[in-house]
């Protein structure tokens, strides 16, 4: 019941603040015998690295993960896998001038209310930096899924009102903004440049698709696959919504339109309005869903606020503050990682579904 | 890690199939000293009772909850509270003719794939009947919240494209379809009558608001309040999406629009785009969110399907089959109950936030 | 984290007070496809039934378990198995005269301190009656173990200073006091008769042996098999100690005596001082351990005590009070059940040990 | 359900192998506002340091703990506390000659059976080195307990047949073998010297006493305080038994002897045979119990064994192998730490016992 842990059998625990010595993640429950190297993890981390494109935060950090335990001679041993990423670019002096100000849209207010204290340097545990640990752990989960042929893909579906063309085939590794539709990506980049110039920020939607999901993953009633995906996604900072399959659009459909009909042509159903599950358990169709991200809360524009004594003040972010103009972009690999973590857990849970499969 | 349990400290475990002898719920972790009677629970159950209105399933069932343990002389004792609801209207003979058919949109296919068997009578554990246990447990959670002045309200926000007027004040106990906007409610009922006449079904959206939420509820990082709400809601049968605050609309806003500014006029912020949390912890503003429900999968219209041998068949529901034309209506008290359960758990978790508050 | 639950993947939750309407247990996580009938459970319950022999409590209760969910057409379905045992002999009027007295050795004092209330009728949740639910659940676990050929045996090893002859082969179903050594059993029965005549009670030690345990069960570091056995046993009312293998005697041995040497003659080791595990994981040798039970706290002899106002009083149990003269006797099937529950859980946990075994 | 985690609300997760880069522990759930420094932890670690006395392993390691997260300006913040101890003395070349041999009493056999691999360097996760993380976390738990005046004491009660005089007042910090009885300690040291000279090892018993425990800690039914203590202790390597209060001796007592009578003279009871709990909940009397340790498995004497191909071999530990002649000595601070961890968890759990105490 640790609030910094996620998953039941494939279980991660993350630690570290954005401006502490390091951040890290322990993966407990990864089966023995999985090939795993630091390179596997660092390849994934490079995807979400800040400063990689002009469209994300200019924080300069190499984000090199080291495996401290749980791997021996290139394979997992069944012992907990400790991954540590040293913090490097943590000069917090720029936060000094605003340390007593409430930052709109940020968690320093609620942390102060809950804990009676707040680490004003960066966002502490509420910082997006924590998500690097999710990406690292997601890389391990992804290797486990790959053993069974399961493949997770995530991409930026929209920024503001600019939507990817649904005809474009989704794929990973899709350029500077993770959007595989080149035309839409160009428009998105222009919109970001414009918002940045105005000292403002934009929201967006990330979509994920999982291919080759076997039928039977997910557990009734409260461990439904979509329930765990929803929790996973809403645990990512800046998220405001989750959909599976038709999502909110389903509320405007009729049963005769929404029901996916079963077929014996090799696929379970002729359509996939459900998004890959029925009753919380995978059907064997691709898993598909979306996550809404709010516009980044840190903006250059001055904002009216209070100081910690309750006096009205104006918040002006110091020169050199580093923030993503659209947090949805860098969230793409995080959504992918959370998908992998949920599926790896469901895969292990499914080992105990029937007596016939006990070894 | 029981998949039929929900919550950490205020923890429920539900059991029972739609056509078994009974269904029930164990509540473990309810603090001692809470006044509780069977009437408290039965009042809540009456809200979601089937057959109550022409707009829900005609299943006739009194749904009388009995408390079997955990209450002594009118108060909780700290022991687990066992609540049992006997099943009464469980003639499953009407399911016989279709027992070998896959039902589009239903979980019998996925349960069969996972467990190698399926209780064809009703929906087994996947049936909406399980949600009666959530409502019963939610009533207990609601009494705990009421001790602290917290009040949960839920209502039907839309059916198909018919939306409640945002000017109407949300309230509980709002007529036959749980929509407090009388005009919208009338339109909704007409739409349902029309869909029923066509042998079809409709989807809808349920909204919840929680008043008087103290600041500080919810735990970083993976026990964020909205993460647990998302999981709670997506564990309800037929749900396809969850939003908090502006939800998916936030993805089309700018930071300068979305940020709620802090104020010292008695409310934490001047607006509530966030929906009541920052960084997963309540701000003290009302908690507000929405849940999307797909149209009911069981429809009168004939549907192409397969039998369990993979042969093409046509599914025609037997005469007398009882199904909600719009499952979102009866889901309103379930959404309310899940809200109460998430908040009761967060309230207890918050007891351990600081050293100062240890007794 | 429910305090009325035990186990991770094969997880039970028990409920009910000794003088409530019923007691019950939910088993969540039992794999689908296990043959199970009410008879399986009632056969086990008959073993621990009160009133069965003159050497146990004369409480007259049929203890008939009913399965309310989770079984369909004679097999488990993967859904939670709800087992309910109605209470029948619950006339609590005999507790009226002593309702305000603290009972030495009983939990009413500590429950009052913790919860501010206490159900004075019988022992509430602290009553040995709760263990009937463990025996019921243990019967289900035992059937799962039997699929893999694992067989749990428990028996009364000693009462007071009367010890079973170590030469006698341990077996289940061993007469009125569950001791397979007939001579020792006779002496035990005489000692009990004598203690009863004096209004006093006796303690004892229960031993368990598990045959055909595969190597590899149990998980490092905090889920070591012996750690979970220890917790399981010390959760049984009236227990004061747990040993595995040589137990406390090991503290007086030398390494050269205690080490079990490996062999290739078909058994892992030539001796079994360890009691069947190394590093918390089973070796393949029989699992063997012991549990110490204190003498029953309820005795006929008058005892000095206090009332709930702190005034000195004398506790004299009312005529007709029913208590076991030696609680260790009826604990034998409970120890056996807890063993089965721990092993069933370890068996399921072991499904995820290596990548090679993922299905 | 992570097998490398312990505790519910005050929850630790340990990682690292004896010959890896480092070992570490994450503490999740420590309330905010607790004063904590690295010095608090290193003082505790110095107690169990190897090489400290001639009576423990000569492994030379400074064991310096660093706090990587969760503490800000000298106080805990509510965020997870990451503590890391770098490994320094990890030359594993001395294990090379015996890497293919099964070591009697060690876990390499069972790890191989379970995981299909084994880190032959040192004991991997089964090494006593993991217990340094428990001591580090126990120091934090101890500081939390100290806020409420609770004080844990542990000491070596016996080695082989040499027992501490029960008249001697137990205290911490009691010389080279942690035994506060100077005469007994002298005898113990002589016995150890003799066993070492013979290439053999000795077992022992560690006792703990906790003073100023408030009434009400511990939760029925499966979270009884003694159940969690039992699990905690049996999770320590080399343990074979656990007792609370009279322990196994209680099995030879009569009810009239064993029952502790209630009194109103300022203590709950006139005696403390129970060892501080009734029904799994603390009474307010000191908590007292014992843990049995087997003789160290690694001995200088040659032992018959097998290689990993099943061929008979003789195991002779290489020159320079470092092992404790009596593992019970260095286990004293570990027993103390586990006590603290169990109590800190119970203290937090108790925050939610009654409605009256909700803040």
Image: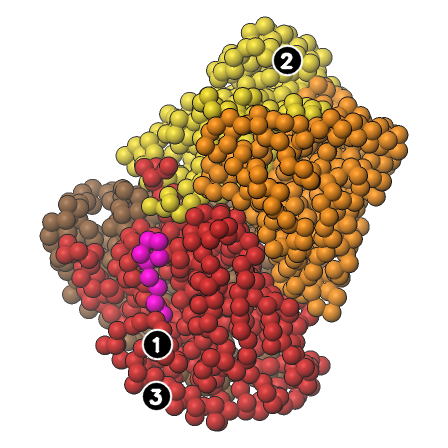
Chain colours: A red, B brown, C yellow, D orange
| x, y percent for residue A217 | 34, 52
| D54 in the magenta segment | no
Span colored in magenta: A146-157
Helix or strand or loop: what does disc 2 sit on? strand
Q: Which residue is mark 3?
A: A187
Disc 1 from disc 2: Cα separation: 75 Å
| x, y percent for residue C356 | 38, 45
Disc 3 or disc 2, which is closer to the eye?
3
| Chain of the residue that carries numbered disc 2 in the rendered image | C
| A156 in the magenta segment | yes
Helix or strand or loop: what does disc 3 sit on? helix
| Chain of the residue that carries numbered disc 3 in the rendered image | A
Disc 1 or disc 2, which is closer to the eye?
1
Q: Which residue is mark 2?
A: C163
Q: Which residue is mark 1?
A: A174
Helix or strand or loop: what does disc 1 sit on? loop
Disc 3 or disc 1, which is closer to the eye?
1
């Amino acid at each position: 019941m640790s609030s910094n842990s996620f998953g039941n059998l494939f279980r991660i625990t993350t630690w570290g603040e954005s401006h502490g010595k390091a951040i890290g993640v322990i993966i407990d429950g990864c089966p023995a015998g999985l090939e795993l190297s630091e390179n596997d993890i660092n390849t994934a981390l490079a995807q979400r690295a800040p400063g990689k494109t002009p469209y994300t935060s200019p924080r300069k950090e190499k984000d090199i993960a080291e495996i401290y335990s749980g791997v021996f001679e290139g394979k997992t041993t069944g012992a907990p896998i400790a991954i540590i990423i040293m913090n490097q670019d943590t000069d917090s002096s720029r936060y000094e001038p605003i340390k007593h100000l409430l930052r709109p849209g940020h968690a320093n207010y609620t942390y102060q209310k809950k804990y009676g204290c707040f680490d004003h340097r960066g966002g502490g545990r509420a910082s997006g930096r924590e998500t690097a640990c999710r990406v690292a752990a997601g890389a391990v989960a992804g290797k486990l899924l790959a053993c069974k042929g399961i493949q997770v893909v995530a991409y930026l579906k929209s920024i503001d009102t600019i939507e990817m063309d649904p005809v474009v085939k989704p794929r990973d590794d899709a350029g500077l903004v993770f959007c595989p539709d080149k035309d839409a990506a160009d428009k998105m980049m222009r919109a970001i440049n414009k918002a940045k110039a105005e000292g403002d920020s934009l929201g967006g939607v990330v979509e994920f698709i999982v291919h080759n999901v076997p039928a039977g993953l997910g557990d009734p009633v409260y461990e439904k696959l979509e329930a765990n995906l929803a929790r996973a996604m809403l645990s990512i900072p800046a998220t405001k919504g989750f959909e599976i399959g038709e999502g909110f659009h389903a509320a405007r459909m009729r049963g005769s339109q929404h029901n996916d009909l079963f077929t014996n042509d090799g696929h379970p159903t002729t359509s996939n309005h459900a998004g890959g599950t029925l009753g919380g358990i995978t059907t064997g169709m691709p898993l598909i869903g979306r996550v809404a991200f709010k516009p980044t809360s840190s903006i250059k524009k001055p904002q009216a606020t209070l100081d910690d004594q309750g006096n009205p003040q104006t918040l002006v972010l110091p020169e050199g503050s580093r923030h993503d103009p659209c947090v949805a972009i860098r969230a793409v690999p995080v959504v992918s990682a959370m998908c992998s973590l949920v599926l790896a857990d469901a895969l292990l849970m499914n080992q105990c579904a029937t007596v016939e499969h006990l070894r």
